[in-house]
Image (cartoon, grey):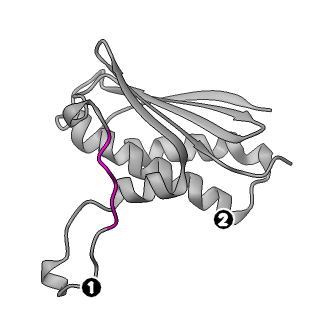
Amino acid sequence: MITFEVCVDSGELAVREALGLVLANLETLSLDVEELATVELVLAEALNNVVEHAYPVTKPGNSIKIHCSQKVTGLHFAITDQGYSMPNGQTPLGLPQNVEVDPFDMPEGGFGWFLIKDLAKDVTYRRVENTNQLALRIAVAIH
């Protein structure tokens, strides 16, 4: 069982850097391609939300921490930041978007939370003092 934490400064390359560090730490688990793709997609969506919404203005010290622990039920992630809180103190509903529309009427956003909630389990958000805490679990096979 592995446990690790990575920390990156929010900014233009934060998501790419964080994903690289997380995936490097997961190499010893020998996850299959689909499991790795799920981890990468879920974390990319969650981290993009932090960069775009919690820290919309980049300045030094805007850190994002990702804690991962492997358990029998899968990979448990906790993502924390000290940016702006989620509207109404909760995650968006993450409902599927209607894609059966003219391409010019296609919504620009709204797909991320649907993907996160569809691919991850036990997704919870809470604001504790000045810290956003997003927790989620990704079910992977234990090797």
* Residue 87: x %, y % from top left: 20, 36
**Secondary structure predominantly adopted by residues drawn in magenta:** loop
For image coordinates 37% across by 26% down, the residue present is: 126
Q: Residues within 10 Å of mark 1 (few under 14, many from 20)?
A: few
Q: Left of 122 or right of it: where is 126?
A: left
Which amino acid type is shown beneath numbered disc 2?
Glu
For image coordinates 38% across by 41% down, the residue present is: 14
Residue 93 lies in the magenta-colored region: yes
Which numbered disc, 2 or 1, marks the residue closer to the eye?
Answer: 1
Label disc, if present, on residue 100 of the rendered structure: 1
Which amino acid type is shown beneath numbered disc 1?
Glu
Q: Left of 1 or right of it: where is 64?
A: left
For image coordinates 49% across by 58% down, the residue present is: 118
Q: Left of 39 or right of it: where is 115?
A: left
* Residue 36: x %, y % from top left: 64, 57
* Residue 5: x %, y % from top left: 58, 27
Magenta range is 91-96
Q: Which residue is mark 2?
A: 34
Q: Residues within 10 Å of mark 2 (few under 14, many from 20)?
A: few
* Residue 89: x %, y % from top left: 26, 30
Q: Is residue 93 visible?
A: yes
User: Tag 1 or tag 2, which sits nearer the N-term?
Assistant: 2
> Is the residue under label 1 in contact with that under label 2 (CB below 8 Å)?
no
Please identify the quarter of the rendering in which residue 38 is found: bottom right
Q: Is residue 58 visible?
A: no
Residue furthest to the top in view is 129
Q: Secondary structure at mark 1?
A: loop
Give the spatial CA distance, label 2 vs label 1.
Answer: 27 Å
